[in-house]
Amino acid sequence: MKLVRTLILILLAVLFPKSADAQEAVVDTTHQKYSYAEMMEDIVGLRDRYQQYMSYEMRDTTYQGRVIPLIYFGNPEASRHIMIQAAMHAREYMSSQLVMAMLEHYLCQMEVATYAGKKLKDIFADICLVILPMVNPDGVEIAQKGAAGAVTEDVRKWARAQFMEGNEYDQIKANARGVDVNRNFKTGFGQDKYAKPSRNFYYYPGIKPYSEVETRLLMKVAREHLYTCFVNYHSKGNLIYYGSNAGSDEVNGAALRLTNIIRRQTGFKPIPPDKSPENGSWADDLEVFFNRPSATIEIGSKNPVPIEEFQKIYRRNLWVWADLAVNLHTILPYGFSEKHIYPLAVVAKKINLKTIAKDMVYERNAEYGVAIKNITPEITKKKKKKKKK
Ligand SMILES: [Zn+2]
């Protein structure tokens, strides 16, 4: 008997040798609250293990002093780029865990896995994913820890006051300044029908477009490469929103092609742009100022998404990046090179972000009660082409 068992064990060892996959995973996907600190550890851990395929930068500092990391999967100098962001909304922090777990999967499979008959290594040889895995860490910390997730007393007080008014901590969408980052962009700023008049866990757009560190960072990163498309992770609904009411038919068509790729992987239902006015969201700005398609993947059945749903969400989303990479050339309109149809010079004229540095001022803002660093980019006034809508 013993001999048989030994023989079986030897046979198994030969048939299933320990692959890179058998190493202990860096990203833990078994617990609910994937925190900012844990994510930072994971980023360093993955970089140490897979340096040749990944790097990261520490970028802008939030109101509560957390530095927002930016990850490059692949060579930043590649000729094509996809920008990915997650956890713009606080309570949607599972999106960070999903993006990090997917990143680990791709990294550890680069030299072994194939997709559509090609090695991942070859698929991503000239494509770089530029990833902001947690855009709003200050908000995430409040969603996970309540007022204790705040660093400064003014934010703790404000968060407690929100709680007393009936807003649950774990439902917060805003950043620590009470601004909904995804309502703080220029296109349609303040037009959201749910817009709140002052800082709130939800839907307050801020005093002006780009008043928030998180918003400005997204705009800056969006200008650093010539992206083919943008993929945004939010929750909930198991849906894909795409395009913008404010975008051109051409770019909305591209957004639909992008979405069809995501749909065939995830099975999530695509939702076309509706007729309501744009509301200061990231997707609106992307299509109007950058003339690029974007898709927003909404994961999970409720917020925060219960960890029990993670594996299913993960399996449905896992191959999206590979599928996008293989089919990237099909997304933008036929007959034009990416550079031809979407020149960055046009974007630069539309948004003069150079003024960001110049306009950096410290203003005492009565609304927030404390001195805050406020940077406001000027949108150069282009003669508006007839009222849109
Ligand atoms: Zn969201």
Image (tube, rainbow, N blue to C red):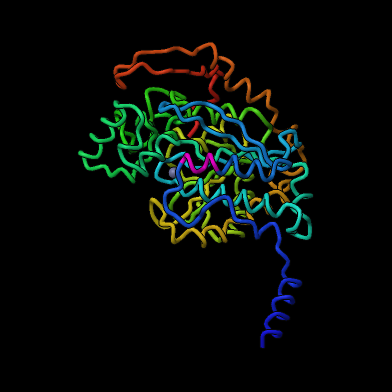
Q: Quadrant of residue 146?
A: top left
Which is more toward the observer, 160 or 145?
A: 145
Work out whether 295 lies above or below 291. below
- In this view, the residue farthest toward the front is 2
Q: What percent of the width, then of the height, locates residue 357?
A: 55, 14
* Quadrant position of residue 276: top left
Residue 294 seen? no
- x%, y% of residue 200? 31, 34
- The image shows residue 314, relative to residue 253, as above or below, that is below
Q: Is residue 303 left or right of residue 105?
A: left
Which residue is most to the left? 164
Horizontal side of residue 157 vs 208, given as left or right: left
Specify start and end residues of the magenta stretch as a single range.
Answer: 36-41
Locate the N terminus and report the quarter of the image it occupies: bottom right
Instruction: Inspect this view and state whether residue 224 appears.
Output: yes
Residue 232 at x, y = what percent?
54, 43
Q: In terms of image quadrants, where is residue 19? A: bottom right
Q: Position of residue 218 (x, y in %)?
A: 54, 31
Residue drawn at 26 percent across, 30 percent down: 157
Left or right: residue 161 compared with residue 24: left
Q: Residue furthest bottom?
A: 1
382 magenta-colored: no
